[in-house]
Image (cartoon, rainbow, N blue to C red):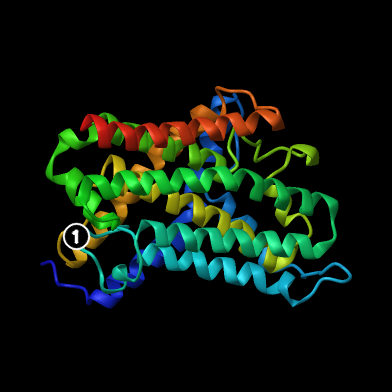
Amino acid sequence: MNPPVPIPLVQLAQALTVLVAAPGVSGVIARVESRLQGRRGTRLLQPYYDLGKLFRKESLAPNGASWVFLVAPIGAMACYLTVPLLIPVLTTFPLPLGYMGDILGGGFVLALASFAVAVAAAETGSPYAQLGASRTKTFGAITEPVVLFVVFTVALVTGTDLPYALAETVRSSAEQIVRPAHLLAAAALLLVILAETGRIPVETHTGTNEFGMIEEARAFEHSGPYLAMLRWGSAMKQLILFTILINVFIAPWGLAATPGIGNVALAIAALLGKCAVLGVLIAVIDNSFAKLRLFKITEFVAAAFLLAVLAVFTLYFGGG
């Protein structure tokens, strides 16, 4: 028996899957990193325990901080819950709210969340938080054009920039994956993911050196439930980017073709498995390279931009 699930519940399941599974994916990456470094490491569920501990703590706000400081984490969480409604998280067929926006629209929503957190960091008056916000926006000025060129590549391949359309194109022909333009766009997106999630060679996300912080520095002055929401949101952004790379560009298989409860359950398991594999790859990269100097990060992001531009030119002029 495979009874159908109402479409609105399937759409809700997409957002809940990202919400619930995001800390677990971060836990898998942290555990693999520990093993690669010869350490025992934390439990796989440690991020959930950390979030629970933060939600039980008191929230404090710096002197002079306005209501923006407190509202920003909530707004960022709302943005991260919106994007899963637009991308193929569990299904091959577009869900009703999936037509609200395309890949570019999803990128704008993620950028809005980042902007809200950056404004909250500026509200604190803390030099470290403001430094992190400034650095994030500086590097974001380069990563955002990368996303635009990746979207252009998608549009040239499918005639539309809807993520479901590209996923269907890849599923219908496995040769699409090895096309030069597709590989270049996927590689550019992977570099953007490393930058956006605060991974080496861009940032040491587990480090304590304030001068090298970028993503982590923005939440420097938050505490209690608000810090929990920022960390949870960061994990959700990571899982969303993983999902876009996997279910749109690399391996859009294992998704539910019909809204049957069994198909949806298998799609959830497939998504978690694929994200775990990608997380292991991220952990290997994290432990195979040294952190770049701050002024060298622009070269790393520029390399992603170059790959994205080459993807467009290869497809447009070379038919690749």
Q: Is residue 85 depicted above or below 271 in this figure? A: below
Q: Position of residue 118 (x, y in %)?
A: 68, 59
Q: Is residue 98 depicted above or below 140 in this figure? A: below
Q: Which of 320 and 39 lies nearest the eye of the viewer?
A: 320
Instruction: Place residue 211 in its image quadrant.
Output: top right
Image mark count: 1
- Relative to 228, 132 lies left or right: right
On the question of residue 197 being in view, the answer is: no
Q: Position of residue 256 (x, y in %)?
A: 20, 58
Query: Image quadrant for the N terminus?
Result: bottom left
**Residue drawn where x is 30% and y is 68% of the image:** 98
Q: Which of 217 and 7 lies nearest the eye of the viewer?
A: 217
Q: Which residue is mark 1?
A: 263
Query: Image quadrant for the C terminus?
Result: top left
Callout 1 crowding tier (Cα within 10 Å): few <14, some 14–19, many ≥20: many
Helix, strand or loop under label 1: helix
Q: Which of 4 and 165 lies nearest the eye of the viewer?
A: 165
Q: Position of residue 82 (x, y in %)?
A: 44, 68
Instruction: Place residue 195 in its image quadrant.
Output: top right
**Residue drawn where x is 16% and y is 36% of the image:** 174
**Residue drawn where x is 28% and y is 70% of the image:** 10
Instruction: Place residue 37 in its image quadrant.
Output: top right
Q: Position of residue 301 (x, y in %)?
A: 55, 35
On the question of residue 188 being in view, the answer is: yes
Q: What amino acid is labelled 1 in the image? A: Asn
Q: Which of 147 and 274 lies nearest the eye of the viewer?
A: 147
- Relative to 127, 23 lies left or right: left
**Residue drawn where x is 58% and y is 37% of the image:** 199
